[in-house]
Image: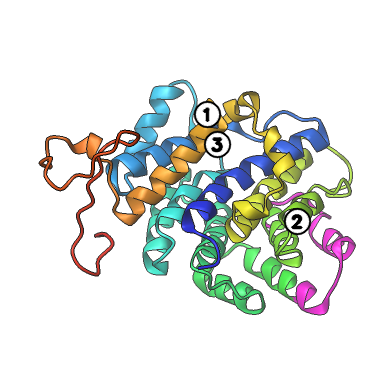
Amino acid sequence: MHYSLNHRFRATFVGTLLGEIIAQNTYKQSPIDSEVGKIAVLGTKSLIELGKLDVDNWLERYHQKSPHLDITDQTSPAAIIATLPVALFFHENTSKLRQNLLHVLQIWHDDPVVRDGALAVGYAIAQSLTEKLHPPSLIPEIIAFIGETPTPLTQKLLKVHELLHGGFGLATAQAEFCREAEPSNVIAMAFYCFLSTREDFRLAVLRANHKDNFGRQTTRTLHYSQMISAITGALSGADNSTAGIPVKWRILLSPENLATWELASFSQMLELSDALVAVWSGVYDIALHTREFPEEGCVKSDEQSRLCVFAAPHVIRLR
């Protein structure tokens, strides 16, 4: 594997948040929607603690944090950000990926555009994590993964495929997808920015923040412009890993900016991401299971806590 899963998981979260922050700086606006960032973090914690998807647990955690807010009212493309932990956790099996994405999308009453967008982004991230992403065939594969739908997203993605195949530039893509501030245009534009500069995280995010997006600035167009940046950051982060994220951009991940996701520090974000990988892979911290396992067989170290890993031969973990 060219990049480790640890670094790809990290870069998906980091890329998403950097996409948000850079868009905020570009348009001089407040955060896109801090609530979806919060539910992404709370959902990640739920997956880590339970080792499985439990939508009721996600909602319970959210209501404990924000009892007066209703996350189910948020049907904009921003809700796609909240599904990223599921895309990461079930990335290796496309049938389970689809099943669990559809399950978590029930939080938003299975809104068709949010559903299709989450499936498209989740599939692309899964292909990056398994190093199976092949740009010429990605869009047709995504359309097949989405299946029959009443939304215009598949047609917009086909247009992205045509633009990329024809070598058309950013101005042509903006003319195609930024004439109207519609959710399907947001998702299509993010895929264009990612795939047209696949190996350059910095350039992909900067192109996603081009000020000609949607022309006249209104509350809605600014919101959608920021969403293009966040989704582009997630897609490019998963594909390019942390190695592709400019070091100087990481200073933007200050406690103030991280607070929108209710994270205290950059290291906390990394620890959360690493814990998600650990649970996915079947590695457990013995300190959390002192009553379950005996001390025999544990490796002791002056600098590290004791760690035991138990697994059947040739099996990483159970699903």
Magenta stretch: give its range.
162-184
Task: Please tell me which residue lies in front, 116 or 191.
Answer: 191
Crowdedness near tag 1: few (<14), some (14–19) or many (≥20) residues, C-alpha within 10 Å? some
> Does residue 221 sit above or below 158 in this rendering?
above
What is the quadrant of residue 151 in the picture? bottom right
Work out whether 11 lies above or below 24: below
Instruction: Give the SS element for disc 3.
Output: helix
Which structural element holds mark 1? Answer: loop
Q: Which residue appears at 38% of the width and 23% of the height?
A: 64
Circle 3 residue: 37
Alpha carbon of mark 3 to alpha carbon of mark 2: how far?
21 Å
**Relative to 104, is 138 on the left or the right?**
right
Which residue position is annotated with label 1? 263
Q: Distance between the residues labelled 1 and 2?
A: 25 Å
Residue kind at label 2, given as amino acid type:
Ala
Q: Residue furthest front?
A: 302
Identified by mark 1, the residue type is Leu
Q: Distance between the residues labelled 3 and 1?
A: 10 Å
Q: Main secondary structure of the magenta part?
A: helix
Q: Position of residue 306 (x, y in %)?
A: 25, 39
Q: Can you identify the residue that label 2 sits on? A: 204
Examine the structure image and report whether residue 180 is included in the region drawn in magenta: yes
The residue shown at (71%, 55%) is: 201
